[in-house]
């Protein structure tokens, strides 16, 4: 029996080739993964989970921020006060600590502000004494102190580092964070819900000419994952979040603000807004995340070449700046 004309004239359906099928599958997976990640930036912030008192009211718990006298650390301190926390500023310079504390008290009269003087480099066993002098219930620890440079020059070929420079970079970014967290974990575990937020960097991917910094931020990522798993297993109420940060305009990274280089306060706000997003390590700022997608899309050799070039440009810029001043 002959098929009706309309069936005979219909365009023929052909099976897709294996390559087209793989392409379609990759595209579907890519689109799904992209939108799944992007939703992180639409979820509500859950930081208030750590600011409830035993009587069920909100407000009055303490957050400790390291490297709090400048840059993103001061941004975190402002944002935490704005969200009703009392804040302990930790830094190494007493005059600057007092100045920043006064600024916060004036800006946020309903928050209490305390200070702790502590040098992160070299790390000393005095970190163990901090837990004894806390002014109240500690529910948030922000391990922010860090940086590629500091009192020495960043963007060095690794063989040109002096012993002290290499050691200081690890102490400042990795060892101090781990030792302080260890010392404060019992106090944090006493609260029903508490948070350790570790500031990591885009550099943890492995950026040339800042080997020591990149590797110490790799330590931050790995430490964050391990501690998160351990606290979950222990059911001690401590949540652990790693915050991946990209270029941000701060005294430590003196670059003009742009779409991809936010101010320290904007970066800090974005970071706190990601709290409760369900990830262990998250890009805090949406535009940094978009930039970070290149790590998954571009071949590593292309990225490494571009980064080495960028680091050398930054080195020249720093050298020109220090000659002018
Ligand atoms: N800015 C960026 O582009 C960028 C990018 C990726 C990741 N990050 C990360 O974000 C965090 C904050 O960076 P930032 O750019 O805001 O830093 P920053 O502008 O250099 O400020 C650093 C803060 O840490 C304090 N500090 C520095 N060395 C210290 C030491 N040895 N002991 C105690 N305190 C010390 C500083 O105190 P003083 O005021 O006394 O100097 C200051 O309060 C770091 O972990 C950094 O690795 C930043």
Image (tube, grey):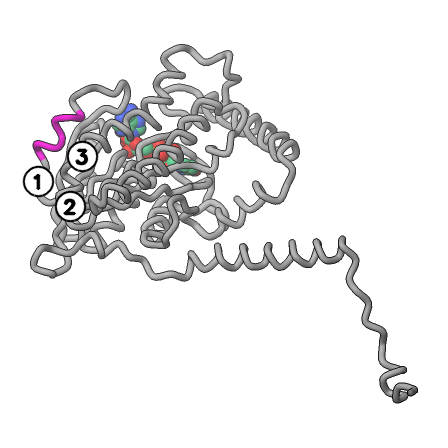
Numbered disc 1: secondary structure: loop
Q: Is the residue 276 above or below the residue 128 in the image?
A: below
Position of the C terminus by quadrant: top left
Left or right: 194 as drawn, with respect to 207: left
Q: Quadrant of residue 190?
A: top left
Task: Residue 151: give x, y in percent of width and height.
Answer: 36, 21
Q: Quadrant of ligand 1?
A: top left
Q: Residues within 10 Å of mark 3 (few under 14, many from 20)?
A: many
- What residue sits right under mark 3 in the picture? 184
Mark 2 Cα-neighbour bin, 10 Å: few <14, some 14–19, many ≥20:
many
Answer with left or right where residue 109 lies relative to residue 23. left
Which one is in front in this view, the residue at disc 2 or the one at disc 3? Answer: 3
Where is residue 97 drawn, in percent x and y?
Answer: 19, 34
Mark 1–mark 3 distance (CA, rounded to whole Å): 13 Å
| Front: mark 1 or 3 | 3
Pointer 1: what residue? 135
Residue bounds of the magenta highlight: 127-133
Q: Is residue 38 magenta?
A: no
**What is the residue that sits farthest to the right in this orientation?**
2
Displayed quadrant of residue 43: bottom left
Q: Position of residue 10 (x, y in %)?
A: 85, 80
Whether pointer 1 and pointer 3 mark residues with C-beta atoms closer than 8 Å, the reply is no
Instruction: Describe the element under mark 3 as helix, strand or loop.
Output: helix
Quadrant into which the N terminus falls: bottom right
Q: Does the image show residue 106?
A: no
84 or 35: nearer the viewer: 35
Q: Are marks 1 and 2 in contact (CB under 8 Å)?
A: yes
- Which tag, 1 or 3, sits closer to the chain's start? 1
Q: Which residue is mark 2?
A: 62
Q: Earlier in the sequence, mark 2 or mark 3?
A: 2
Depth check: 140 or 258 in front? 140
């Amino acid at each position: 029996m002959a098929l009706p004309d309309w069936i005979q004239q219909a365009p023929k359906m052909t099976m897709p080739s294996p390559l087209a099928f793989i392409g379609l599958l990759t595209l579907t997976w890519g689109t799904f993964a992209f939108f799944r990640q992007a939703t992180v930036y639409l979820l509500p912030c859950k930081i208030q989970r750590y600011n409830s008192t035993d009587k069920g009211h909100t407000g009055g718990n303490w957050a400790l921020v390291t490297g709090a006298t400048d840059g993103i650390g001061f941004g975190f301190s402002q944002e935490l006060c704005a969200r009703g926390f009392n804040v302990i500023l930790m830094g190494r310079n007493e005059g600057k600590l007092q100045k920043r504390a006064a600024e916060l008290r004036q800006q946020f009269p309903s928050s209490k502000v305390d200070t702790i003087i502590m040098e992160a480099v070299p790390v000393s066993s005095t970190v163990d004494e901090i837990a004894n002098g806390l002014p109240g219930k500690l529910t948030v620890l922000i391990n922010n102190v860090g940086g590629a440079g500091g009192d020495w020059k960043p963007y060095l070929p690794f063989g040109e580092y002096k012993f002290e420079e290499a050691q200081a970079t690890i102490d400042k970014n990795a060892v101090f964070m781990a030792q302080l967290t260890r010392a404060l974990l019992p106090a944090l575990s006493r609260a029903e819900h508490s948070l350790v937020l570790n500031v990591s960097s885009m550099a943890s991917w492995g950026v040339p000419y800042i080997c020591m910094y990149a590797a110490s931020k790799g330590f931050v990522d790995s430490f964050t994952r391990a501690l998160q798993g351990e606290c979950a297993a222990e059911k001690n109420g401590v949540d652990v979040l790693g915050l991946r940060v990209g270029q941000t305009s701060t005294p430590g990274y003196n670059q003009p603000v742009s779409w991809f280089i936010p101010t320290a306060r904007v970066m800090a706000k974005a970071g706190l807004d990601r709290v409760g997003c369900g990830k262990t390590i998250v890009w805090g700022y949406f535009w940094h995340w978009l930039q970070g997608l290149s790590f998954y899309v571009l071949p590593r050799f292309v990225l490494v070449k571009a980064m080495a070039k960028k680091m050398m440009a930054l080195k020249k810029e720093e050298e020109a700046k220090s000659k002018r001043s």
